Image (cartoon, coloured by chain):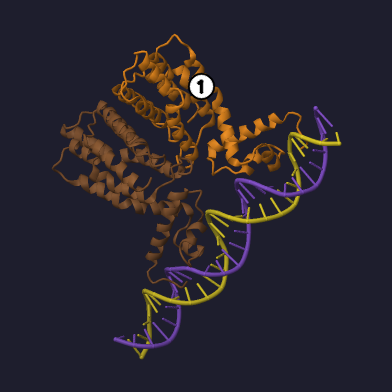
Chain colours: A brown, B orange, C purple, D yellow
Amino acid sequence: MGRNKYPEETVAKILDAALELFCAQGYEGTSIQDIVDRLDGMTKGAVYHHFKSKEEIFNAAFDRAMAPIVEHRRSMLGVGNMTGAQKLKRLYASESVVPQIELWARMRPAADPVKSSRLLAMQYQGSFDESADGCLLPVIEEGIADGSIACECPREAAEAVSLLANLWLLPLFRPLEPKDRMLARAQCLAQMAAAVGLDLGEEVLQTTARIWDVWDRAGW
Amino acid sequence: MGRNKYPEETVAKILDAALELFCAQGYEGTSIQDIVDRLDGMTKGAVYHHFKSKEEIFNAAFDRAMAPIVEHRRSMLGVGNMTGAQKLKRLYASESVVPQIELWARMRPAADPVKSSRLLAMQYQGSFDESADGCLLPVIEEGIADGSIACECPREAAEAVSLLANLWLLPLFRPLEPKDRMLARAQCLAQMAAAVGLDLGEEVLQTTARIWDVWDRAGW
DNA sequence: TCGATAAATACATACTAGCGGTATGTATGG
DNA sequence: CCATACATACCGCTAGTATGTATTTATCGA
């Protein structure tokens, strides 16, 4: 295959193939050759020309997939005419969560946590980052500042809620539970969050129900 | 090296070396050759004579390390003259948790969640198992039966508390936080658990403080 | 504005060290 | 004597590298 006039198309193809394979087979279960085999005619040389390691491909693939979602979340919080409490509820409302869920539904990571261990580790790490640098903690602190939220331990509450939301309420790396069990989790999480001053709103239940429908429709 | 009269000593040596390396360098970061190199004079043939795969070594190493702790927990709950609520508190009291912590302090898993991703995945999976088949959920249900616990969603509460305790309050795969931050987490977890009917007791704070001391003394 | 040339880029090809795992050989204890 | 506890030698595959080649693009004088 000759040289491409638009190399970013090649990069995109590589990342598309990589994302799919990493989700389906995990990091260790996916070889560079597996990726190359999906890029009809292309060879390993092309891949290693654009990326310097397998790890870099992995990170680039997921960064690219996540970028629009992260931006959407951020933009939602830029507005000034909302209290912190309102923004918090909105973070867990359908409009915020569903796009992310649809991405995962397309990707279908392996339901075995060991197979998906690297993705799991990223989600785990990300839950702490989300609290520190992301949306959740800043919103809570905004709410405390404007008086709409009363929370004694904002950082801890943010971390706990974030972890539970990412790894328990939306358990990407475990088999899908029945709908009522998932709703029970949402209810339980809302109660626990309320106990530390965070009102996630009634919408959490509806959001969870919608997520379940999306996943179920995707044949999860 | 000639044939050993007591092959179980050889097995023990292999598992000791493997446990240490898997903790320090992670699963993927540890090669069979790394393990062999710590068994002075022994070769790969010996290892593959006693174990049929790397994964089997990994599981055997951690099963062996965990066995006494699991048994200790179980035995503690066998007694009949305690209510479910009392047993629950005891699950998170020092006597139950500290032995486990000391094991981890000796092993010192890598603080990078990606490096430790397989261990993280095991802890994650284990949190759900602990709720279903382990100690927590049975104890809660015992408490409900004897009237000492009032919990509307025992399964969900058990899962959430177990996850937070294993992956957040005792974050093996993250850098050690300052003591006050860890105590804040314990306080926060206790509040959240109380909201769904689980009283973890005041001892949780003391237990957490002791754990922090152990880890700190171990130069974590 | 044009074409020639040089340089940078986008790949392909061929290779390496190290990996998990296996097949087989050998010596020792029961 | 034979099952067991190892050692030795090997295999296919992996992530990654070194190098070769063709095509695009920048640079140049005219």
Mark 1 is surrounded, within 10 Å at the Cα level, by few (under 14), some (14 to 19) or many (20 or more) other residues, namely some
Q: Looking at the image, which residue is at 41% across and 51% down?
A: A59
When the figure is inspected, residue A127 is found, relative to residue B210, above or below; the finding is below
Q: Position of residue D19 (x, y in %)?
A: 57, 69
Q: Looking at the image, which residue is at 43% across and 35% down?
A: B174
Q: Looking at the image, which residue is at 22% across and 32% down?
A: A199
Q: Quadrant of residue B60?
A: top right
Q: Secondary structure at mark 1?
A: helix
Q: Position of residue A120 (x, y in %)?
A: 42, 41
When the figure is inspected, residue A214 is found, relative to residue B19, above or below; the finding is below
Type of amino acid at the residue the image marks with label 1: Pro
In-image side of B20 versus A216 (left or right): right
Q: Position of residue A102 (x, y in %)?
A: 31, 49
In the foreground, A215 or B52: A215
In the foreground, D27 or A69: A69
Q: Quadrant of residue B35?
A: top right
Q: Position of residue D8 (x, y in %)?
A: 76, 47
Asked whether residue A135 appears in the rendered view, the answer is no
- Quarter of the image where the N terminus of chain B is located: top right
Query: Where is mark 1, residue-wise?
Result: B99
In-image side of A203 versus A213 (left or right): left
Kindly give the residue lying farthest to the top in the view shown. B81
When the figure is inspected, residue A176 is found, relative to residue A56, above or below; the finding is above
Asked whether residue B133 appears in the rendered view, the answer is yes
| Callout count | 1
When the figure is inspected, residue B159 is found, relative to residue A213, above or below; the finding is above
Q: Looking at the image, which residue is at 20% across and 46% down?
A: A78
The chain holding disc 1 is: B
In the foreground, B134 or D23: B134
